[in-house]
């Protein structure tokens, strides 16, 4: 079995080393991420495996704090006429008392890099190129290990990528990568591992295995996310409640259905967060808008629909195919009253057999509550927004999830997919209805077709 490639993640204090590792490992709980300096005090490791084979071991190291003084001290240790190479100079330093006292943090970093195959030198690209960083690189170069500079936090306007590129080139480091651990590009990991393969040719096979697996997992996550959204939409489209048209039963039934749909949407939100390895508390108030893991803008608030460019139309009754009309639209729900008897009877015996108890209930003065198309559109738009945001969110992000207004207008104004029209006629397809048949083959087929259109 091939030995796992060992990488030491090194750099100045508070430049995002732990943040990078959280994103690479998809583990929001790895280490401690904070704006305080010197958060990491010890070496911590993580292992990436494929099919049970360990391919990559990543080691988070403490931040380098006093490279200028350390480099001066190393030069003082040199003896006249001595010609030691870098690793030998460092071994002598590490055997001395200063490595256990004054330069304890730096010694931990150097020991780990010496024991690794290569290092990722993480740089906060918002910082100016200072002498201390050059001295850090000079000291790390003594380890004799390949170093790949990683420019972190490059998405902001304060980033100084060009300054760093020029400074690194003057030090002989021409291969580098931009990788924002808070908002990484979708191909960031691919470019990172491809750059490592150029520096470590012998490790190319295992890095390629890792790349192939990550591409497969990324697609699986996306497909699973789309299916979660499709299941939500079918559940809500097929949802139907019958209520007697008397007293306060209709308002109570409306509120009960509102609550059920809200809870079902929340299940989808939490499912997407789990799928992308985020915790419920990782989604907080912001433009999302999630409040403590819940949507802040009410699903049935007309203003919410308006903000996302969705018009509240006339609605479609669940029994429209049987000739049932629409007489009222209340709070994002369609209430279908009893249709004209002539229209019902005109459908013939086959229609009556198909709709059975539903038509009987209508003829007896009951109403059927279904969720309006506008609310289905809203569910689709904001769940897809969340899915897109999670795809581009690093696991070190501390700020609220930020969303932009949707660019695709198909769900705002376009025709709804046929799968949702079919779901309207099959209340047994909804988990929100009693006696649901969730494993029905046609339901599964329509969910699959719908997920492909998202």
Image: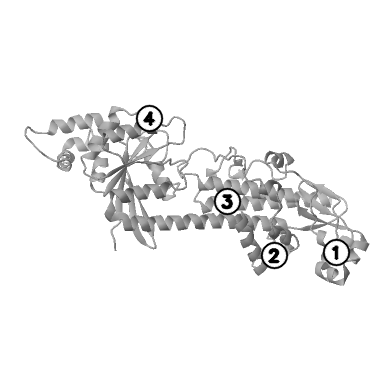
Q: Position of residue 143 (x, y in %)?
A: 21, 42
**Looking at the image, is mark 4 or mark 3 earlier in the sequence?**
4
Kindly report the distance in space between the C-alpha atoms of the residues bearing marks 2 and 3: 22 Å
Few, some or many C-alpha atoms within 10 Å of disc 4 (few <14, some 14-19, many ≥20)? some
SS at circle 2:
loop
Whether tag 4 and tag 3 are in contact, CB under 8 A, the answer is: no
**Looking at the image, is mark 1 or mark 3 earlier in the sequence?**
3
Q: Position of residue 429 (x, y in %)?
A: 69, 63
In the rendered image, which quarter contains the N terminus? bottom left
Kindly report the distance in space between the C-alpha atoms of the residues bearing marks 2 and 4: 58 Å
Residue visible at 68% across and 38% down in the picture: 307
Q: Position of residue 452 (x, y in %)?
A: 60, 58
Q: Position of residue 306 (x, y in %)?
A: 71, 40
Few, some or many C-alpha atoms within 10 Å of disc 1 (few <14, some 14-19, many ≥20)? many
229 to the left or right of 65: right
> Which image quadrant is residue 70 in?
top left
Whether tag 4 and tag 1 are in contact, CB under 8 A, the answer is: no
97 to the left or right of 168: left
Q: Which is more foreground, mark 4 or mark 3?
A: 4
Residue at image mark 4:
127
SS at circle 1:
helix
**Looking at the image, is mark 2 or mark 3 earlier in the sequence?**
3
Which residue is the extreme one toward the right? 342
**Looking at the image, is mark 2 or mark 4 earlier in the sequence?**
4
SS at circle 3:
helix
Residue at image mark 1:
359
Few, some or many C-alpha atoms within 10 Å of disc 3 (few <14, some 14-19, many ≥20)? some
SS at circle 4:
loop
**Residue 374 makes an appearance in the image:** yes
Residue 436 image label: 2
Kindly report the distance in space between the C-alpha atoms of the residues bearing marks 4 and 3: 37 Å
């Amino acid at each position: 079995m091939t030995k796992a490639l060992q990488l030491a993640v090194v750099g100045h204090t508070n430049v995002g080393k732990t943040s990078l590792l959280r994103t690479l490992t998809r583990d929001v709980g790895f280490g401690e991420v904070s704006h305080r300096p010197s958060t990491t005090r010890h070496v911590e490791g993580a292992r990436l495996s494929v099919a049970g084979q360990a391919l990559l071991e990543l080691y988070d190291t403490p931040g380098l704090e006093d490279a200028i003084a350390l480099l001066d001290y190393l030069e003082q240790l040199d003896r006249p006429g001595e010609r030691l190479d870098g690793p030998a100079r460092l071994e002598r330093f590490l055997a001395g008392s200063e490595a256990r006292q004054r330069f304890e943090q730096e010694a931990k970093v150097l020991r780990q890099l010496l024991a690794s195959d290569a290092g990722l030198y993480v740089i906060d690209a918002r910082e100016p190129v200072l002498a201390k960083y050059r001295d850090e690189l000079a000291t790390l170069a003594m380890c004799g290990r390949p170093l790949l500079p990683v420019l972190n936090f490059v998405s902001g306007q304060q980033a100084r990528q060009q300054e760093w590129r020029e400074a690194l080139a003057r030090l002989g480091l021409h291969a580098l990568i931009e990788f924002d651990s808070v908002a990484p590009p979708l191909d960031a990991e691919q470019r990172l591992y491809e750059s490592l393969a150029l520096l470590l040719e012998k490790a190319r096979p295992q890095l390629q295995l890792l790349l192939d697996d990550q591409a497969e997992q990324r697609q699986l996550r996306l497909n699973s996310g789309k299916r979660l959204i499709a299941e939500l939409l079918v559940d809500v489209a097929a949802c139907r409640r019958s209520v007697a048209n008397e007293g306060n039963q209709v308002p109570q039934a409306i509120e009960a259905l509102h609550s059920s749909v809200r809870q079902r949407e929340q299940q989808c939100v939490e499912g997407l967060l789990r799928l992308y390895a985020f915790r419920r508390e990782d989604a907080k108030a912001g433009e999302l808008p999630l409040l403590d893991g819940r949507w802040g803008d009410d699903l049935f608030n007309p203003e919410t629909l308006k903000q996302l460019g969705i018009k509240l139309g006339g609605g479609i009754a669940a029994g429209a195919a049987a000739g049932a009309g629409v007489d009222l639209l209340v709070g994002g729900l369609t209430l279908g009253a009893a249709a004209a008897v002539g229209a019902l009877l005109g459908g013939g015996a086959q229609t009556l057999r198909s709709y059975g108890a539903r038509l009987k209930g209508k003829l007896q003065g009951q109403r059927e509550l279904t969720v309006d198309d506008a609310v289905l559109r809203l569910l689709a738009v904001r769940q897809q927004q969340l899915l897109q945001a999670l795809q581009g969110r690093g696991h070190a992000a501390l700020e609220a999830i930020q969303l932009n207004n949707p660019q695709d207008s198909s769900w705002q104004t376009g025709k709804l997919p046929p799968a949702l029209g079919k779901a309207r006629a099959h209340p047994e397809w909804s988990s929100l209805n009693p006696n649901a048949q969730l494993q029905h083959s046609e339901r599964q087929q329509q969910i699959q077709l719908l997920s492909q259109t998202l």
